Image (spheres, grey):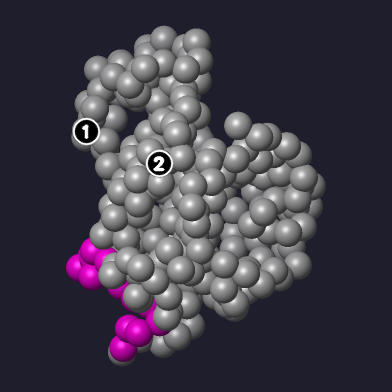
């Protein structure tokens, strides 16, 4: 597939390495790894099309239509023409993501995209099965598909993605902080910021940190952090930590000639290989050995 180094297609200003995965009728699929040269905010870029951005690794802050948020390997962004976006990398590391650019005419033919066509940019997170479907889609494209199969697989993935987005909007554990009543706006913003800071700490990759150490890092008590994080994200800190490190494990499993599973378990803070296997299976439904076969681009599924 075509590869290159140039401006990041998402940000218009940052250099990046990119790889086109495929371009069936009306949909362009590609991967990007951002190269960080400036930790500050990029200039604001106006989107010209509909985009799905699926996190793979790394972290960054984004400002979409004036609202600031945090993205990591679990993040999903849906953008529309006219959405305004800027990004920053306060932790200094880059990020990688998969992007689908979809023609408006393609979306207009699908009954499940009406809300996307008419509402502002949406941010949420992928669960384990959706993230695995995303990574398997990339591996299948890299093995080689004809244009017909590319299109069908992309539409099937969109079925799953948009079903997840619709369900996530109704997630009972999460709170829409912009619509919540009975709380001061400053308190709501502070809670969102606290949850984002905890996500930043978890994303730094030191999986030996205890809950107390994470809480001290963000300037909160463990109880307060745990309660606020659950309220803001709909997820416990433990569950989020597992989601982030399983994403990192999946990246490693996709490497050709990657390290043995016992080494992977040690590197990502699991008690042993059995613990790694149990957590990965709980997250995505398959053990690591099978995932290695599924995700390595040059091997048969």
- Secondary structure at badge 2 equals helix
Relative side of 148 to 197, left or right: left
Q: Which residue is drawn at 35% across and 45% down?
A: 152
Rendered-image quadrant of the N terminus: top right
Q: Residue at x 50, y 10 (%)?
A: 257
Relative side of 291 to 207, left or right: left
Mark 1–mark 2 distance (CA, rounded to whole Å): 28 Å
Q: Is residue 182 above or below residue 4?
A: below
Residue holding disc 1: 285
Tell me the quarter of the picture where residue 244 sits. Answer: top left
Which secondary structure class fits the magenta region best?
A: loop
Relative side of 122 to 278, left or right: right
Q: Where is residue 214 in the image (x, y as percent from the top left)?
A: 45, 47
Q: Where is residue 31 in the image (x, y as percent from the top left)?
A: 57, 42
Q: Looking at this view, is 109 or 292 the one in front? A: 109
Q: Where is residue 147 in the image (x, y as percent from the top left)?
A: 46, 40
Circle 1 Cα neighbour tier, 10 Å, few/some/many (<14 / 14–19 / ≥20):
some
Q: In this view, does 279 lie above or below 13?
A: above
Q: Looking at this view, is 139 or 168 the one in front? A: 139
- Secondary structure at badge 1 equals loop
Q: Is residue 247 above or below residue 219?
A: above
Relative side of 105 to 126, left or right: right
Answer yes or no: is residue 211 visible.
no
Q: Is residue 121 above or below residue 257?
A: below
Q: Looking at this view, is 61 or 239 the one in front? A: 61
The stretch drawn in magenta includes residue 178: yes
Residue holding disc 2: 148
Answer yes or no: is residue 110 visible.
yes
What range of the chain is rendered magenta? 166-181
């Amino acid at each position: 597939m075509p590869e290159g180094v140039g401006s990041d297609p998402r940000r218009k200003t940052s250099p990046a390495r990119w790889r086109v995965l495929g371009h069936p009728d009306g949909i362009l699929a590609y991967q990007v790894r951002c190269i960080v040269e400036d930790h500050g905010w990029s200039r604001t870029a106006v989107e010209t099309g509909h985009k799905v951005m699926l996190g793979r690794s790394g972290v960054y802050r984004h400002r979409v239509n004036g609202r600031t948020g945090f993205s990591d390997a679990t993040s999903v962004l849906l953008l529309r023409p006219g959405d305004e976006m800027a990004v920053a990398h306060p932790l200094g590391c880059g990020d990688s993501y998969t992007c689908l650019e979809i023609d408006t005419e393609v979306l207009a033919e699908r009954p499940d995209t009406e809300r996307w066509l008419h509402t502002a940019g949406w941010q949420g997170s992928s669960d384990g099965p959706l993230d695995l479907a995303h990574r398997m889609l990339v591996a299948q494209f890299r093995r080689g598909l004809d244009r017909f199969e590319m299109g069908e697989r992309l539409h099937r993935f969109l079925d799953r993605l948009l079903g997840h987005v619709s369900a996530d909007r109704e997630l009972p554990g999460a709170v829409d902080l912009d619509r919540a009543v009975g709380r001061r706006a400053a308190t709501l913003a502070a809670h969102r910021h606290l949850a984002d800071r905890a996500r930043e700490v978890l994303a730094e990759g030191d999986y030996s940190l205890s809950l107390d150490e994470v809480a001290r890092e963000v300037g909160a008590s463990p109880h307060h952090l745990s309660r606020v994080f659950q309220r803001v994200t709909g997820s416990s800190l433990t569950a989020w930590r597992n989601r982030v490190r399983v994403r990192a494990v999946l990246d490693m499993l996709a490497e050709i000639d990657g390290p043995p599973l016992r080494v992977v378990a040690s590197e990502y803070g699991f008690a042993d290989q059995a613990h790694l296997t149990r957590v990965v299976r709980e997250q995505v439904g398959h053990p690591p050995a099978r995932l290695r076969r599924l995700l390595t681009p040059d091997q048969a599924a």
